[in-house]
Image (cartoon, rainbow, N blue to C red):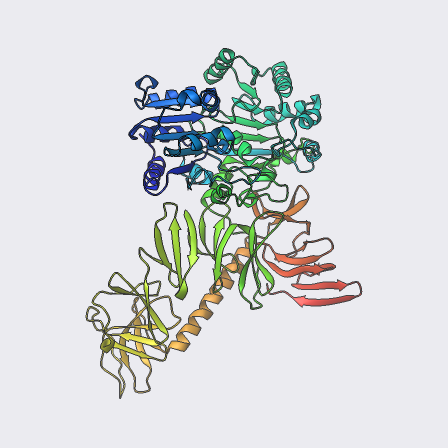
Amino acid sequence: MLRPYQLDIRRRVLDGWRKHCSIMVQMPTGTGKTHLLASIVKDTDGTVWIVAHRRELVEQIEETVARYGLRKEDGKVRVMSIQWLARHWEDMKDELPDLIVIDEAHHALADTYRELWRRWPEARKLGMTATPCRMNRNGFTDLFETLIASDSIADFIRQGWLSAFDYVSIRPDSEDQQLVDSLSKRGTDGDYQIKEMDAVLNRRPGIGRLYESVRRYANGKKGIVYAISIAHARNIAAYYSHKGVNAVAIDSRTPAPLRKQMVEDFRQGNIRVLVNVDVFSEGFDCPDVEFVQMARPTLSLAKYLQQVGRGLRRTEGKESCVLIDNVGLYRLFGLPAAERDWQAMFGGRMAGKGCACTGQGLRTVAMEVSAGEAAIPDSGLEVVVTHDRLMELLELPEAGSMVTARDGGGLKAFKDRKSGLYGLECGGKVTALPQYAAVFGTEDGLAAVRFADGRAGVVDEEGHERMSPGLYRKLKFLKDGLLLLIDRTGHESYLDLKNGHFYPVKPRVLSFGRVQMLEVGGYCYSRTRELYRNRSGICKSGLWDKDGCLRILDGSIPPSGRLPDADGADWDRGGICLFADDYETYYYYCGRLADGSLMVEDTRGNCCLAEAELRAADRKAVEREEREKKHASRLVGMRGVRPFRSGMKWGLRLGDKVILPPIYRNIMSPVGNYCAFEGNPCQWGVLMLDGRIVVEARYAKVEIENDGMVRLTVVPGKTKTVKLGH
């Protein structure tokens, strides 16, 4: 039986074939692409070819489709390698397949694959891949008409379909990272040149450090090591074996029967470590892999995700996997759970190539060193994130790192070149630090964003969530405070940003003076958090609109029991009142006094005189006061915040929780609720304990006093003093 997400992809493929002849499907490694294609093939009328990248994949696919009753002897399905097919074009010229499935379809840009389109243009094409990207930014749109992308790796981990992981990496100032950074030559594919990598990294001291990292973080576990070359793999296997680890090297020169026996011994646990050279980057299925060690630098996002993906498959009794990054790949690509824009890579708008200045998705990482690791300063390693911390970050996006500024001007997004993430600025000042994978748009002080964990939501200019994040493909601001939400299946829904209520179809905005209502499906709704719905419809004769107040005569609302007890009062009771700029609740109409004041009763039974302008102003003042109290209380609980360093950058940490990721050149010890920080060289500013910037980093020197006074040195000899708020 297919899993729910496989059934969803299957449905989208079948629907897609109504409009397209060729479709590419993206699903992360370990989520069952082969089972999905077998299910699709089983229900396909006519002959099906499945074309694989290597012979080993042919055998694996044949075994999988056989479970669905599709044996090669029946003739309906033929599984073949592209190499075999290229040698037998003429033998196959009279064949007329109805469907051609390309496994590992990111290889489909090669001329041998393109021949499939030239020779059999009428056959439908289905490409399956985990990584629809190329290092040279070549897109796939001249072969495949559309891309159907599944949920992200973060989604699958959150839902329990993929394994959580611990991620260990070399430090940015370690000897190994310096060796990787020294690599300057490139191969014909744009990746690091193998000859140079082998010369620089295939040395005894480096191999010794590889072993030490496995001993410390994956001792006794079953795992796969990715090496640079055949010589490198054999040297690693020999060293590990000398240290008592049952390890073997496997590569393209390993005879097929011996390779098959090694893999079977590994599955049975007779071999603990397989050291390979590009053998298990695609298609290898062994769910109980407990660690993956990356000893081969690469600039290819596809290679990185294919390698780490070998450890993310779930199996009974496997709590998590340890990913040991001895070549610093996550600094180029982010963690495996980082958000990827597959549509942009599929279309050729983005390259699947690592860059030292991107670091996409690093905010998902608590870039912190464990207490045990901190006690071993010469190890050259750091724990980037543990599996329990990863799950916490995936479930609850961190609020951290927000900054304040209210100098007017429109809210805009900006991109940080170093991290590759987006922040927010207003009136020329940064209001939210770079922490978002994407910003869909801004409107009226709000921003529709994609968080680093892949979910999308709405935040205000300071980064506070105004809509709970969800799994949406796109968010778009509409007129009159409405938001369009498109989920991953393409389904549309709408959110009223005034009150947070969702609607399945687009509402029609009704304006009554300064008060608005929404009409959906024949009903009228208030734009208040406590929702009023008019069941009988609204007619103009039942409305009274004056000075920002809308009174609606509604026969389904019983008259209030409270009556004005005064001369000249209006006893015409009944209905409800809505007030301009009051988005909290609606009110029951009690009556109108001789001076024109209204008496209303809220839904909790509190009776009061109401005047629209005053009610809106009072409510905003109360809300502002409540926010300030909560912020002050939060700062009191953060008095234990301390600066910490990761690599060359500084952040703030409270115990084992990262409050502010390490993004600054320097941070001084807190004074009260504040810290002095250095942004650019010799440019200092002030931030709060929760990461909010209160003084921009543009001063030569900053001195904070205990009473909240701060002395700012503009240039030597010229200073100014500022009183901080808290």
Q: Is residue 698 visible?
A: yes
Classify residue 201 by image quadrant.
Answer: top right
Quarter placement of the N terminus: top left
The image position of residue 249, as x and y in percent, is: 58, 17
The image position of residue 191, as x and y in percent, is: 62, 33
Q: Is residue 498 left or right of residue 684?
A: left
Identified at 55% across, 14% down, the residue is: 254
* On screen, residue 339 above or below 495: above
The image position of residue 69, as x and y in percent, is: 30, 22
* On screen, residue 265 above or below 307: above
Q: Is residue 304 left or right of residue 486?
A: right
Q: Is residue 316 visible?
A: no
* On screen, residue 601 above or below 684: below
Q: Is residue 32 left or right of residue 605?
A: right
Foreground residue, 473 or 203? Answer: 473
Identified at 74% across, 59% down, the residue is: 700
